Each structure stands twice: as C-alpha cells, then as structure tokens.
Image: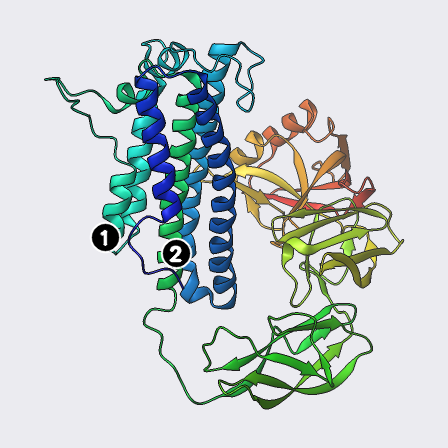
Amino acid sequence: MGSSSNKMTPRQKMINLMYIVLTAMLALNVSSDVLDGFTQVHDGLSRTNSNVGLRNGALYRQLETLTEQNPDKGAPWLAKATSLRAHTDSLYSLIDSLKLEIVREADGKDGDVDNIMSRDDLEAAAVVMLSPGRNRGSELRKRIDAFREHACSLLPDTLKRGNIAEVLSTDNILRRGTLTATTWEESRFEQQPVVAAVTLLAKLQNDILYAEGEVLTSLLSQVDAGDVRVNELHALVLPQSRLVIRGGKYSANIVLAAVDTTQRPQVFVGGKALGNDRGLYEFTAGNPGSYTYEGYLEVPLGDGTTARHPFSSSYTVMEPMATVSATMMNVLYAGIENPVGISVPGVAMSDISATMTNGSLRREGDHWIAKPTTVGEDAVISVTATMDGRPVPVAATTFRVRKLPDPTPYIAIRNAQDQTEHYRGSKPLAKASLVAAGGVGAAIDDGLLDTPFTVLGFQTIMFDGSGNAMAENSDGANFSQRQKQQFQRLSRGKRFFISRIRAVGPDGITRDLSPMEVIVN
C-alpha cells in the first residue's frame, strides 16, 4: 500500500538544496534579492506542506476505512496512527506559533507571516528562540526530539528510521574553524534574518509531514500483513434481535462470512440494493406478527465476474409491553412510600421514564417509589421507553389506592438485655417495667409495611375493691401523673384496660384502635 523507496523524493532534495544555497548567499551579505528568494521558498514550502498534509490525511482516512471494515485488524494500527497525528498536529501548531511570534517581534503586534515587512531583521529570531527570557528554541528542540523518537518507534524498517532520524536531527553542530560545538537552535536562529528563520521553520514543518507520511504509509502496509485467505463462502444475516417492539427499529448486519477482501460485496434485499456499503439493513417495524425476507450478495471475483450468494431471515414484531408491579401488594397505600418495580424487556433502565396520577412517583436507582394521596381514587402509572432516540409509550397500569390498615397499640418497655420491646397485652407484665414506661405507642410493624403512627390520646380503666371502674385520661401519648400513681398501687395479678386509643397515620386519617388488656406480674 505504500512506497518501498527509502530515499527522499527529488522535490524534498530540491527544497533542501535551495535552502542551503540561500543560506550561503546570506552569509555573503547578498542584497534583497536573496530575501526575495527566501520569500519564494517559504511560499513554495507552504503550498507543499498543504499538499503533503492532504496526502497524509488521505492515508489516515484509508486506515479509518479499513478499521471500519475490519475493526480487529485495523484498530491497533489506527490507534498508532491517531497517536502520531496528535503529535504531528501539536508540533506543527507550535511551529506556526513560533513563526508568528518571530514576525511580530520584528514587525509589531500586527505582524503577518505572509507579508513580512522587516525581512532582514537579524535580532527578532534570536530574541524569540534564544533569549533567556523565552528560549523557545530549546523547547522546540525537545519537542522535535520527542516527535522523532515516537515516529521512529512506529517504523519497523531500519532504513526509513535512519532517514527520519537524519531529517529531524537536532544534534549540536561543530562548525569549521571552531573548537566548541554550537547547539541546534543557535546554529539556526543566531543572526538569522526573519524571512530565513520563518522559511527554516516552514521547512521543519515539511520534514515533520514527510516523517508522518512515511509512518502512515508503513502502518497502512501492515494492516494486511499475516492475512489468511479462505475459499469457503457463506452469506449470513445477523440481526440485533428477532423480536421488535412496534415503533422500534429492526437492525441486521448482512455479511459474507469467511471472506477477507478489500472489496465489499453488494447487498440486495427484495431485489433492491442497500443504501450503504456496510451490509446494514434496517427499517421501522409496523404491525405485530412474524415476517421473513430474502436477498442475495454479489461478490466481485478476480476475473471480473461476480458470484451471487443468496440469504434469507425472519423477524417478529410484538406489541409494546412493560412489567409494572407493586412489590408490597396489589394495591398502593395512601400517604406512604410504596416500592414499585418498572421494567421494559429489551430496554435499558436509564431509557425508561414513568409518571403517576393521584400522587407522586420518583426513581431511586433501578427502583421506583410511588406515594398516592387520595384514598379511593385510582392511581395510573404510565411508562415510556426511549427507543432509537424517540420516546414510545409502552404501558399504563391502574392501581387501587387504599388507606393503611389500623395499627396495633403497644407499651414500649426495656427487657433484661436493656433492649426495647413492644408489649401488646394479654400476658403478664412486670410492675417495674410498667412504672418505667412512658406511654402508649402504635404502629404497623408486621415486617411488610412497617409504618409508625402518632397516638393522640387514650384512657386507662381500673377497678377498685368493690368492682367499680375508675377511668383516667392520658396526657397525649404519655401516661398522666394520676395514671402512674395508680400503677404504683397495683398488686400482683391485677388487670386493667387501655381503651379509647386514638392514633393518626401518615395518610392523615385518625382512627380508634382496639383496647389493650394489661396484666401486672
């Protein structure tokens, strides 16, 4: 897929030679004609860089196309090419910014790289690239070194690696007649006219694009390395699912199995060619039912003829459906949070939404919480699923809303292990525990609803020695002082009743609870 030549192109050699000649003429302090020559070389390099950039872009797109056709084969090489492109773009942009910085140093803040006024300025390039305050030349050298090492690491061909290493070399230079080597940046930007420095940077961009092209060509040639050819062909239809919800999209890949070729087969379904070269067949499903379709693949052969491979497949369209269930019971209770499960087969939980009448509905992770408000009024949960980017209503389920069952009254006491227990009557209770208790509570604590109620008040009924009933009212949910004094006078085996217990729940409904018999032990 790429050139096997390991030498620079004639155009590359010509550009290098022109730059050397013009630099030599500058050393002789030749007139402005030389500066004009640098301007022409810069313009030519800019056009060349643009063309080379387009060529490299085409090579990169070839890798992308091969990866789309065969991700397993192309993806590793495309990843390397993408990394290289990022390095190239970053370094190319840095050099563009250095050009502009040098020109503006010479011409002012309105300086234009394409229209340099102070072309013969010998200080601007050194100030930008070599001065301690900026020293951008050192930064550029380090970036070139990193790019060169990265590009060479992607090339298996030692000759090409040597070419790129030579073209992008940043070694120190020992000039004739001197004893000390000059750094790469000093040799290029010390006492260099602005137009020459800008042209040098353009040439450096050309070298970078040249290196990128060599590496991209090498990566492209490696995609097909080690391929195994086969001689048995099968046409296959690979649907994403054979069950399609009405209003959803049917998608299937129609492929030629056991074939590895740079030419994709042409796919026909029902006598019509598909509108893409990936074998993707899709449409919006209509009425529910089972359907079949058939077609064929046309595969180009090496002798110019084509081979036809038929295929057939089927799919089923079903009505939208959803599963909505109250996880506690088949009804919803007003005033409390009812856990509800909502799901749509084949649709991710994140693509499901729901609303509710007669109350509120909210999502908590993969579950939902329904809180109805009005007892006796139905609550309707409506479910919508997002399919192929658009919302599709899939279900509406009606629930009856009931009030909470009556709670059971209790006296909270401490047991021998200093744990709280609920005494519900009809069995002996230690007098000390009764005296220490604060009052009467009420709750539904059957392990299912587990809902506390607020006791508004109650009455204790005790009997004197003559059998006369003595009623005492509570202090809200707490025992009154008179009730506690009566408890102190109770002897073992005595009984009393707690009646007229009134409590209100989270549904706001006040209710009268059943009496509770207390037996003193």
| Viewer-nearest residue: 423 or 354 | 354
Name the residue that disc number 1 marks: 159
Q: Give the Cα separation between the discs numbered 2 and 1.
A: 14 Å
Please give the name of the residue rendered at 76% of the width and 30% of the height, measured from the top-left corner. Answer: 473
Q: Quadrant of the C terminus?
A: top right
> In this rendering, is residue 512 above or below 110?
below
Which label's residue is closer to the chain start, 2 or 1? 1
Q: Number of callouts in the render?
A: 2
> In this rendering, is residue 63 above or below 120?
below
Check disc 1 and report its element: helix, strand or loop.
helix
Q: Position of residue 112 (x, y in %)?
A: 56, 19
Check disc 2 and report its element: helix, strand or loop.
helix
> Seen in the image, is 114 located left or right of residue 78?
right
How many other residues sit within 10 Å of disc 2, few (<14), some (14-19) or many (≥20)?
Answer: many
> Seen in the image, is 103 located left or right of residue 131?
right
Q: Quadrant of the N terminus?
A: bottom left
Please give the name of the residue rendered at 79% of the width and 51% of the height, measured from the top-left corner. Answer: 355
Whether residue 462 appears in this view of the structure is: no
Closer to the camera: disc 2 or disc 1? Answer: 1
Residue 282 lies in quadrant: bottom right
Whether residue 442 appears in this view of the structure is: yes
Q: Amino acid at mark 1?
A: Leu
Q: Extreme left residue here?
A: 179
Residue 388 lies in quadrant: bottom right
Name the residue that disc number 2 marks: 217
Please give the name of the residue rendered at 38% of the width and 9% of the height, measured from the top-left corner. Answer: 123
Q: Amino acid at mark 2?
A: Thr
Q: Position of residue 203 (x, y in %)?
A: 40, 33
> Seen in the image, is 266 located left or right of residue 433?
right
